[in-house]
Image (tube, rainbow, N blue to C red):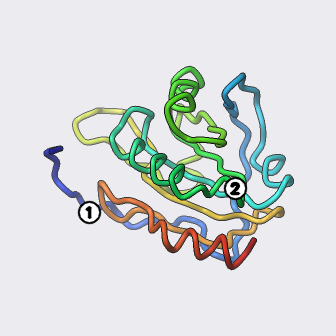
Amino acid sequence: MVDFEVVSLPETDHPTVGEIAPDFTRPLVNEEYWEDASLSSVVADGPTLLVFHPMDGAFPTTYIWKEIDERGFAADVQVVGVSISSPYEHKELLKERAADARLFSDPTAEVAAAYDVEHDLDGMAGVTEHRPAVFLLDEERTILYAWVAGEWPEFPAYDEIAAAIDDHV
């Protein structure tokens, strides 16, 4: 059993339902290669589930992608992750999990800051990662569903995500 303390996270001013999700350009990794891509170019291809997650290899990331894979969200919407991990680390995650997903690399956590979902790691000066967060976006980047973790660790409300996908896709 993993031994950890549940910690309340500070309130956020993250984007909410009805708002336009901030656009960004970062390396987007798939199983074969990566290239710079903007969020707006990704969502133009259809409804997109944008999943912020901790660094690759962290236990919450494993559980988040395991559940997303098992629920088959990628059959109904594009699934795109974003974390501080490098494209090389993302390639490994894609081999193990994140079936049919692509992953943005945000090593400076600037995208996390734009969405107000950054999380400073305790005991690690200067290390900021992404707190778990999920946004369902339409082709115009309008947010149709939003969930952001309020404590560490906390996992997305997968049934709510599935209902939001059913309601909007």
Residue under label 2? 75
Number of numbered callouts drawn: 2
Q: Earlier in the sequence, mark 1 or mark 2?
A: 1
162 lies left or right of 169: left
Q: Nearer the viewer, mark 1 or mark 2?
A: 2
Q: Which residue is depicted at the point 67% across and 75% down?
A: 166
In the depicted structure, whether residue 144 falls above or below residue 81: below
Q: Amino acid at mark 2?
A: Ala
Q: Which residue is depicted at the point 42% across and 43% down?
A: 61
**What mark, if any, has residue 145 been given in the picture?**
none
In the depicted structure, whether residue 76 falls above or below residue 79: below
The percent coordinates of residue 76 (x first, y second) are 71, 60
**Dot 2: few (<14), some (14–19), or many (≥20) neighbours within 10 Å?**
few
SS state under label 1: strand
SS state under label 2: helix
Q: Which residue is depicted at the point 54% across and 58% down?
A: 71
The percent coordinates of residue 139 (x first, y second) are 83, 62
Quadrant for residue 82, please give it: top right
Q: Which residue is depicted at the point 69% across and 35% down?
A: 26
In the depicted structure, whether residue 168 falls above or below residue 2: below
Q: CA distance from mark 1 to mark 2?
A: 34 Å
- Taking depth in this image into account, of 125 and 105 the one nearest to the observer is 105
Task: Work out which quarter of the rendered image holds the C terminus and state it.
Answer: bottom right
**Dot 1: few (<14), some (14–19), or many (≥20) neighbours within 10 Å?**
few
Quadrant for residue 9, please give it: bottom left
Residue under label 1? 8
Q: Amino acid at mark 1?
A: Ser
Task: Work out which quarter of the rendered image holds the N terminus and state it.
Answer: top left
